[in-house]
Amino acid sequence: MTHPAHDAPSSLGSGHGLAVAFFAVVLAVWAAVMGASLRQAALPDDTDGLMLAVFHPGASEDDAFRAMVAAGGEPVRATWLGFAYVARGREPGFVGRLKAQGALAAFGELPVGPTLGGCAAMPVDVAKIAATKLQ
């Protein structure tokens, strides 16, 4: 005698397996697209201008501001990410100097995701920039 209750979980389990496999494929495709987008948007070390400066997650805002100023640039605004800031360097080589000060990377406009303005950015605290002292 078979019990219908025992048949339901096995068919339900195979449905979950298919959903997990589909999710894994979608995640892998997304990661590949983001990786290619970030490589394309990464700026060379001799670049200046407006850019997205990315620091280690957990880096303090004060340390990031100090690094941007020490690299010869200026913080423009923070983003909702908390470790990425819009920065401007007016002299060639700003990206290289920024990396030397601890930034992981600097990016130009990304083909997908947040841009250098709009809803992904927040206004910068001008008083905090003025109070940033180099050591």
Image (cartoon, rainbow, N blue to C red):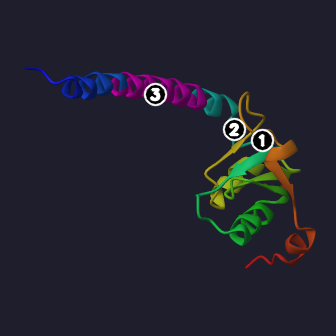
Residue picked out by circle 3: 23
Q: Amino acid at mark 3?
A: Phe
Residue, disc 2: 44
Q: Residue at x 28, y 21 (%)?
A: 11
Residue type at numbered disc 2: Pro
Task: Name the quadrant containing residue 76.
Answer: bottom right
Q: Evaluate if marks 1 and 2 touch, with contact meaning CB atoms under 8 Å apart.
A: yes
To which residue does mark 1 refer? 47
Mark 1 and mark 3 in contact? Answer it, CB < 8 Å: no
Quick check: is 30 in the magenta stretch? yes
- The answer to whether residue 108 is above or below residue 28 is below
**Tag 2 secondary structure:** loop
Does dot 1 land on a helix, a strand or a loop? loop
Percent position (x, y) of residue 107? 72, 40
How far apart, in angstroms, are the residues tagged by discs 1 and 2? 6 Å
In the rendered image, residue 23, in percent from the top left (x then y), is placed at 46, 28
Counting residues from the start of the chain, the first of labels 1 and 3 encountered is 3
Marks 2 and 3 sit apart, C-alpha to C-alpha, by 34 Å
What range of the chain is rendered magenta?
Answer: 16-35
